[in-house]
Amino acid sequence: MSLAALLISILALALSGFTFWWHNWRPGKLRVGTPHTYAGHTAADKLLLEFPFVFFNKGAKTVIVDNLRVRLPEQDGEPLTFVATVERLGTDTGRASATPFFVGPGQAVRMICEFQRNPGGNRLTARHCIVQLDARLNGLTQWTPIHEFPLNVTEDALAMLSRFLVVRENKLES
């Protein structure tokens, strides 16, 4: 009988330790929602894109997002740098310089992020392309891909984007 009691005690201790780790020490895991709209402007000297993101932390520890960037892997050229946040997509309302932010355990953060590349180079073309969102997380220096999503630029959108900052739906044409 003492062997069974010892085995049950060891299993209970292991389960308690695992439960404590799961609720308190499990690393944060960042999930990002795919944006259904975007704003953009293209010019010879600048490419500007704004995306509304929702960042959700599935882990038990806070995730610190030190920096972001977006890449258009199908295009050669430098990534677009995270330069600002805005309160309303396609406007300067509540514009603030980009700063690190955190996402607490089980929390979601909604943020409209503005990315720029100067010079613009490799302007957008009317097509469906994939955008990769990279982040520097928790004080590390390497870039980590955290989300990929489609960017759907139509001929009509492209004509407008070259004249001024405009908000567009990010969906495939039917």
Image: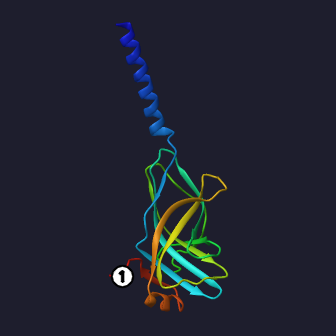
Considering every residue shown, the one lying at the far top of the view is 1
Direction from residue 37 to residue 125 in the image, left or right:
right
Relative height, residue 19 to residue 100 (above, below): above
How far from the left and from the top, in percent, is residue 16? 43, 28
Mark 1 Cα shell of 10 Å, populated few (<14), some (14-19), many (≥20): few
Q: Between residues 9 and 113, which one lies in front from this camera angle? A: 9
Q: Identify the image's colour scheme: rainbow, by chain, secondary structure or one colour.
A: rainbow
How far from the left and from the top, in percent, is residue 168? 43, 82
Locate the N terminus by quadrant.
top left
How far from the left and from the top, in percent, is residue 30? 49, 54
Q: Between residues 95 and 128, which one lies in front from this camera angle? A: 128
Identity of the residue drawn at 54% across and 90% down: 162
Q: Looking at the image, how many numbered discs can be counted on the residues?
A: 1
Q: Between residues 116 and 159, which one lies in front from this camera angle? A: 159
Relative height, residue 105 to residue 93 (above, below): above
Locate the C terminus by quadrant.
bottom left
The secondary structure type at the circle numbered 1 is loop
Direction from residue 78 to residue 42 in the image, left or right:
left
Q: What residue type is labelled 1?
A: Glu
Relative height, residue 11 to residue 79 (above, below): above
Identity of the residue drawn at 53% across and 92% down: 163
Q: Between residues 8 and 55, which one lies in front from this camera angle? A: 8
Identity of the residue drawn at 64% across and 52% down: 139
The quadrant holding residue 4 is top left
Q: Name the residue under label 1.
A: 173
Direction from residue 43 to residue 9 in the image, left or right:
left
Identity of the residue drawn at 41% across and 22% down: 11
